Amino acid sequence: MINRTVASVKEALAGVKSGMTLMVGGFGLSGIPENSIAQLVELGVSDLTCISNNAGVDDFGLGLLLQGKQIKKMISSYVGENDEFERQMLSGELEVELIPQGTLAERCRAAQAGIPAFYTPAGYGTEVAEGKEERVFNDKPHILEHAFKADFAFVKAWKGDTAGNLIFKGTARNFNPVMCGAASITVAEVEELVPAGELDPNQIHIPGIFVKRIFQGEKYEKRIEQRTTRTRD
């Protein structure tokens, strides 16, 4: 049985260098690879291009890399919760490519499946379509979108085994699955790591073939991005 485990997050991120393109899983603060992001901060790599649905918040998630000016370009769908992101974007310090959320997911999935490009109606007639090939299918205009090319993909799962099989929990099953195998090297951090064969095959969301390195993370904060409460009358 293939063993894809590594001993630590430091070993998991071996080979990450400045100037690389990274995929980072999660949606808001749900299911983000907290340990991998912290190690990226520790490594001090810079000029990164990050593909992620959003950029975290000012003091958590990818917001930590933005604070250290480690990110050169963000390719995202939603960036409304990060003041530092807004400041860097408006000042021209940060290059930003905004993509419709479904297109972002599909460009990841296409890379995962080895599909070089696809047509979608999303974004036609807007700035998103500028400079892109257009075709009409079933009397509806579409634009050509290309699969992403990334050096590393960092994902976070609830449980995994030593062979790299992954199970995601709740809303953490968002951009994480489509990023697995969509980069040259996929690094998975999990809350619980078990021996191969212990997971129910019917419950596995991502097979180990899509994962190159896996490790058990620690000290997950699992912050709530927007907390809404009310008092009883």
Image (cartoon, grey):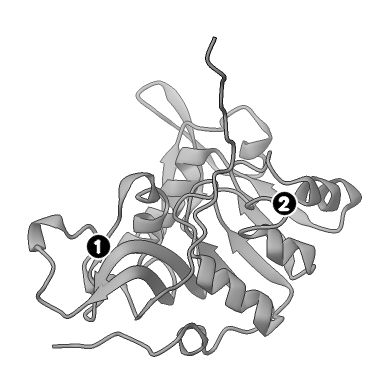
Q: Is residue 46 left or right of residue 113?
A: right
Q: What's the residue at 34%, 50% (across, down)?
A: 173
Residue type at mark 2 is: Val
Residue type at mark 1 is: Ile
Q: Quadrant of the C terminus?
A: top right
Tell me which corner region of the image, top left, top right, bottom left or bottom right, holds residue 71.
bottom right
Residue 102, placed above or below residue 49: above
The residue at the far front in this view is 233
Which of disc 2 and disc 1 is earlier in sequence? 2
**Secondary structure beneath label 1:** loop
Q: Is residue 215 left or right of residue 23?
A: left
Mark linked to residue 206: 1
Q: What's the residue at 87%, 53% (across, down)?
A: 92
Q: Quadrant of the N terminus?
A: bottom left
Q: Which residue is mark 2?
A: 96
Dots 1 and 2: beta carbons under 8 Å? Answer: no
Along the line of sight, which residue is nearer the eye, 78 or 225? 225
Along the line of sight, which residue is nearer the eye, 118 or 18? 18
Mark linked to residue 29: none
Q: Residues within 10 Å of mark 2 (few under 14, many from 20)?
A: some
